[in-house]
Amino acid sequence: MIRSDLIRGHLDSIILRLIFEKDQYGYEISKEISSRTNDRFQIKEATLYAVFQRLERKELIESYVGSVSHGGKRKYYRITTLGKAYLKEMVEEWKEIKEIIDLFMEGL
């Protein structure tokens, strides 16, 4: 299991990336994170919804109510144009950070 403090600063980018691929609802995103990391990282529900709120306040995502499923309506999230631009910046920043960290960590 990955320590959450190591990944916390990148949650916005991770969630934006998933929503960039397709509109999704909270539980779906949570399961996708677990699946892609082979259960090495699991996001807590409270953390996930705090990220949604933060991203909506910054107008990087927007929510809408989807069609009825299993007796209830789901709140879906989609990335905005501003969110796409922000995600692109975050990807470039990540590449640079990764390069720098690799300089110190490779070869051990």
Image (spheres, grey):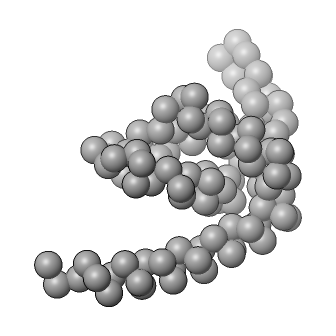
Q: Residue furthest left?
A: 108
Q: Is residue 73 above or below residue 42?
A: above
Q: Residue furthest top?
A: 71
At 17% from the left edge and 84% from the top edge, which residue is drawn?
107
At 42% from the left edge and 85% from the top edge, which residue is drawn?
99
Location of residue 47 in the rendering, given as x and y in whole percent from the top left corner: 56, 35
Quadrant of the drawing holding the C terminus: bottom left
Residue 28 visible in the shown view: no
Residue 13 visible in the shown view: yes
User: How many numbered marks have been drawn onto this rendered protein structure?
Assistant: 0
Q: Quadrant of residue 10?
A: bottom right
Front-most of residues 87 and 22: 87
Location of residue 58 in the rendering, given as x and y in whole percent from the top left corner: 82, 52
Front-most of residues 48 and 33: 48
Quadrant of the drawing holding the N terminus: top left
Q: Quadrant of residue 7?
A: bottom left
At 85% from the left edge and 52% from the top edge, which residue is drawn?
59
Location of residue 76 in the rendering, given as x and y in whole percent from the top left corner: 74, 37
The answer to whether residue 88 is left or right of residue 3 is right
Location of residue 106 in the rendering, given as x and y in whole percent from the top left corner: 23, 82
The answer to whether residue 72 is left or right of residue 5 is right
